[in-house]
Amino acid sequence: QVQVVESGGGLVQPGGSLRLSCAASGFTLDYYAIGWFRQAPGKEREGVSCISSSDGNTYYADSVKGRFTISRDNAKNTVYLQMNSLKPEDTAVYYCAAGSIVVVTTGCPGQFDYWGQGTQVTVSS
């Protein structure tokens, strides 16, 4: 089955950390750019971070720059989003997506072929 699956979400206190994983099955992530998106209740979906397929070029939204790090491990067919210094405003459902035509810039626009089901991240004391 061709899919991407997110994991690693949960409840964390402000200032804490989580690492989200985006694992692909049925296809090789090497040839795809990966985007992480989030959607909070009542808000539009936001492109948080993305990474290119080839040169490792990355993008981060201003709201997460310096706190989140995206990385890929092609040997494990997985992309990660390390989230540090989490804030209550980071609370959202986080989705990963694999795209064949993606521009690694503001909002990570492009054609995403595979989307995960999402993982909930809640930052609260």
Image (cartoon, rainbow, N blue to C red):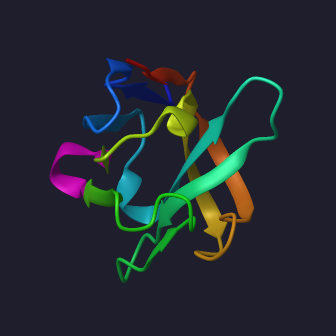
Residue pictured at 42% horizontal, 42% vertical: 27
Where residue 17 sits, quadrant-wise, is top left
Which one is nearer the viewer's eye here, 102 or 105?
105
Q: Is residue 95 visible?
A: no
Examine the rendered structure and indicate whether residue 55 appears above or below residue 103.
below
Residue 37 drawn at (x, y percent): 60, 45
Which one is nearer the viewer's eye here, 116 or 9?
9
Can you name the residue that lies furthest to the front here?
125
Per the image, is 75 magenta?
A: yes
Examine the rendered structure and indicate whether residue 123 appears above or below residue 103.
above
Where residue 23 sits, quadrant-wise, is top left
Q: Is residue 27 visible?
A: yes
Per the image, is 120 magenta?
A: no
Residue 32 drawn at (x, y percent): 49, 60
Residue 43 drawn at (x, y percent): 80, 35
Where residue 22 sits, quadrant-wise, is top left
Viewport quadrant of the C terminus: top left
| Region in magenta | 73-81
Residue 36 drawn at (x, y percent): 53, 48
Examine the rendered structure and indicate whether residue 40 appears above or below residue 101.
above
Residue pictured at 42% horizontal, 80% vertical: 57
64 vs 107, left or right, is left
Which one is nearer the viewer's eye here, 125 or 65?
125
